[in-house]
Image (cartoon, rainbow, N blue to C red):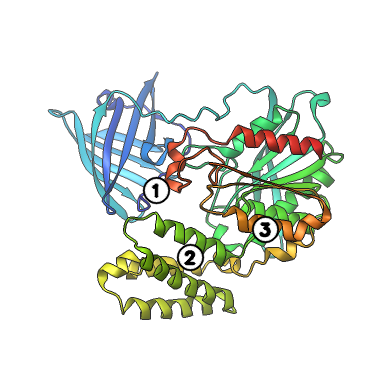
Amino acid sequence: MNSIRIFLTTLMCIPFMCFAQIEGIWMGKLNIPSNDQLRLVLSVEQDGDSLYAELDSPDQYASGIKVDILSFRNDTLRFKSNSTNASYIGIYDKSKDSFSGTFRQGKGKLPLNLNRTENRILINRPQTPQPPFPYDEEDVKLKFSDKKIGEFSIEGTLTYPVRKEDYNKKLLILVTGSGWQDRDESIMGHKPFAVIADYFTRRGYAVFRYDDFPRTKLANYSTHDLAIAAGYIVNYFKQFNEHFKDSQIGVMGHSEGGSIAVILAAENKNVDFIVSLAGMMTDAKTTLQYQNRILCETSNNFNESEVEESQRITGQLYDILKKAPNKQKAVEECRTYMTEYANTMTPEQQEKYNMTGQNRFAILRTFGTTWFFELFKLDMTKYLKKVKCPVLAVNGKKDLQVEWTTNFALFSKYIKGHGQLTTHAYEDRNHLFQHCQTGLVNEYGKIEETFSEDVLKDIEAWLEEK
């Protein structure tokens, strides 16, 4: 599923040409090397003298993907999506009313035949907010500058009550999890941060959510670097925005964002309270080995001894990362270890344990990023010890990415003494706080619920007390 990735974006208007033959909805299937299939849908509509074209990837819960270029000449269809680095060239068969051609994304290419279909496949996300909204919404662009990190724009959305008297003097700043995330923390057709912002703004809060560092630069920065940027946002609203100088400012972070919230609570006096949504307090090795074990145990290909062997391999690699003095040394030692180990395996075993030459190359690329390497140097306990403000930590008991008991134990050990900690673990909730059956990542997109409303209600009740 990961070899072809398509991401959600927006609608595009393209010049109209005389190709009424391609108006309509076209669907085909991409045969992925992992013996899986991805449906791809092209929707073309005429509006006056223009055509509107979009792509959907329903099996990845993505829709409305921007088509930047579309042409149909001499029975040849061409389209391109810049945001996904994807393109297609297909030949039209009049007798079959279909196209046969090649889909390209990055350096990969796959055959793709497109056939007419009647309807687009709708992805139902009933909690996603829809305008008009009973509150004000505006885009905010801040110029961020730091000697180490550099300069770039922080772009986000601020929502707040229309009437000044309805504002409760509390501003929530939402911080996303690991990997590049947009301001809505969009995933599999869900927009959790849009849902959270809508819920609390309707109840008198101001909420700011923002896009991550530029996508191409994100891997060059550590979790603490991301915390510096988040702290800049806090300081802007507290010190330089006259509308919020007298407000209480809270940081609500999800996953890695929960870690960032704790770092800010420890280092930034302008943070009045924090909410950790499945925040990671354990060391990176503990969290990643928890995830690895879950993946192996839920795979039909691994028996008990093989699960333990996978844990041993990953554990050794993570120990190298933790002890290495720099990225270069870490990559060098990990490459040596993986190469020597892979040489003792059969081709089938290499495939099974992700130890083929291609797998090792991809793993080392990740290990060589600043973000991943520094993750193993991150000691959350030193920040937890310094937190003095009120803290709410919530987790799902079926969270298979951040295990709740070990993380709550660390919260309780270092914060409870201040009398400022509240924790709540929810039955049958996953890492996204959806009601779930398994908690597995591949279940996220199948669930219509974006964020459990009873969790939102409990957070609201806690905020009202504070």
Q: Amino acid at mark 1?
A: Arg
Q: Earlier in the sequence, mark 1 or mark 2?
A: 1
Residue 207: give x, y in percent of width and height. Answer: 71, 37
Q: Amino acid at mark 3?
A: Ala
Whether residue 365 sits left or right of residue 226 in the image: it is left
Rendered view: 261 above or below 148: above
| Quadrant of the rendered image containing residue 17 | top left
Crowd band around label 2 with a 10 angstrom C-alpha radius: few (<14), some (14–19), many (20+): some
Which disc is residue 5 wearing?
1
Q: Residue at x 37, y 68 (%)?
A: 305
Q: Secondary structure at mark 2?
A: helix
Residue closer to the observer: 179 or 236? 179
Comparing marks 2 and 3, which lies closer to the viewer?
Answer: 3
Q: Earlier in the sequence, mark 3 or mark 1?
A: 1
Q: Amino acid at mark 2?
A: Thr
Rendered view: 204 above or below 109: above
Quarter of the figure with the C terminus: top right
Q: Residue at x 55, y 42 (%)?
A: 429
Which disc is residue 409 wearing?
3
Whether residue 65 sits left or right of residue 95 in the image: it is right
Q: Earlier in the sequence, mark 2 or mark 3?
A: 2
Q: Residue furthest left?
A: 95
- Find the distance from the CA under tag 1 to the CA under tag 2: 18 Å
Q: Secondary structure at mark 1?
A: loop
Crowd band around label 1 with a 10 angstrom C-alpha radius: few (<14), some (14–19), many (20+): some
Q: Residue at x 77, y 54 (%)?
A: 265
Can residue 430 be seen here? The reply is yes
Tally of numbered discs: 3
Circle 2 sits on which residue? Answer: 366
Comparing marks 3 and 1, which lies closer to the viewer?
Answer: 3
- Find the distance from the CA under tag 2 to the CA under tag 3: 30 Å
Residue 33: give x, y in percent of width and height. Answer: 27, 54
